[in-house]
Image: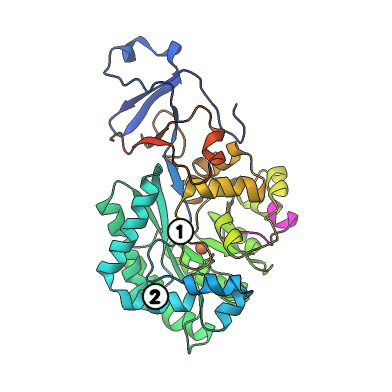
Amino acid sequence: MAGGGTVLIEHGAIVLDGDRILWVGPEAELPGAHRTVSHEDLEGRLVTPALIDCHTHLVHGGHRAREFEMRLEGASYEEIARAGGGIVSTVEATRGAGEEALLKAALRRADALIAEGVGAVEVKSGYGLDIEIELTMLRVARRIGDLRPLRVKTSFLGAHAVPKGMDADSYLDGICIPALDAAHAEGLVDAVDGFCEGIAFSTDQIARVFDRAAALGLPVKLHAEQLSHQGGTALAARYGALSADHLEYATAEDAATLARSGTVAVLLPGAFYTLHEKRQPPVAAFRTEGVPMAVATDWNPGSSPLGSLLLAMNMASTLFGLTPAEALAGATCHAARALGLTDCGVIAPGKRADLAIWDVETPAELAYGIGINPLHKRIFGGRE
Ligand code: DI6
Ligand code: FE
């Protein structure tokens, strides 16, 4: 056992059959039938499942470097948002970008993740806040998966912010929920997300979006307790959410609630770091309750311009106290679960042959390095 639910096999062998894993175990126990197939000596390198980034906003226009400067001058994320910056400023940039420019920028980001061994990524909408651009964002997300060897899971995040000049309820009724219906009708939605926060939507408002998701048969997930405690975690659990994300302000009671609903806690240390947050998610309570903890980049232009899942793993260890093995499980098997994926995130017979091969001696080196990419190569669906 290497800890965090991971198992390290020394002198291991993996047999692939097309896009699937056929066998894994110690090389000494390799069945005779597999000894004659063509093979590659990995020279003692570490093999892990391909990494999975289960929370990103890869499709967006523009940047928010000015807000970075403002925070260094002492402004908070909420103050910037209330002053007209924040998410709604990226909405303007995204609406103005055009589909091809959004795709080009998103592909660059996807390529950066692929280059460090990522094989699956979640991509959210939420910077359109009108029907047309929410759909455009999701179409762009799907095109990433068509154009790159990468699995893309989409989340509809219409309930991300209230657009300028509207009140939250008329936005939800007049735009957000109709946009969800339209996106679902086009097959663009794998899950429904929301931002439950004082500067965004209340639990009652998110519940209306989740009711619609349930009616459409779609799973839900939620940005919950990031900047304050609003009760989003309990709400997410009530709807059997795949994941509750951020959770800095979650309590031990919330942890018990997540355990009961089987919801994954997605930790996003890039946002904690970027926003100079002080309060850490209740990692000890997650451990005690047996809540699976995933780790993701939250790659977005405002609260987490973080383009490295390996760095997110490092931050999860240094800032939140995850063991390196927990961080690795968080970027593989628990991340898969946060996306409702059951065929990846582990190396086991029958699972997809999505693997990352690393120039490291021990698994702990993956979270230990800061800004170091030790990827030797990635296998996606059995192919290099
Ligand atoms: N929480 C986040 O961390 C991102 N969205 C959210 O609801 C931030 C998005 C942004 O600031 O643009
Ligand atoms: Fe986010």
Q: Residue 348: percent from the left, percent from the top?
A: 44, 29
Q: Is residue 294 left or right of residue 135?
A: right
Q: Which region shows up in magenta?
A: 246-255
Q: Label 2 belongs to which residue?
A: 128
For the point 34% across and 60% down, the residue is 106
For the point 46% across and 72% down, the residue is 64
323 up-or-down from 12: above or below: below
State which quadrant residue 139 falls in: bottom left
4 up-or-down from 59: above or below: above
Q: CA distance from mark 2 to mark 1?
A: 15 Å
Q: Label 1 belongs to which residue?
A: 56
CB at mark 1 closer than 8 A to ligand 2?
A: yes
Marks counted in the figure total: 2
Quadrant containing the C terminus is top left
Q: Residue 108: percent from the left, percent from the top?
A: 33, 57
Query: Tag 2: residue type?
Result: Gly
Q: Residue 249: percent from the left, percent from the top?
A: 69, 62
Q: Is residue 22 left or right of residue 257?
A: left
For the residue pair 234 and 139, the one nearer the viewer reads as 139
State which quadrant residue 231 falls in: bottom right
Q: Earlier in the sequence, mark 2 or mark 1?
A: 1
CB at mark 2 closer than 8 A to ligand 1?
A: no
Query: Tag 1: residue type?
Result: Thr
Q: Residue 176: percent from the left, percent from the top?
A: 44, 76
Which structural element holds mark 2?
loop
The answer, for residue 268, to whether it is visible in the render is: no
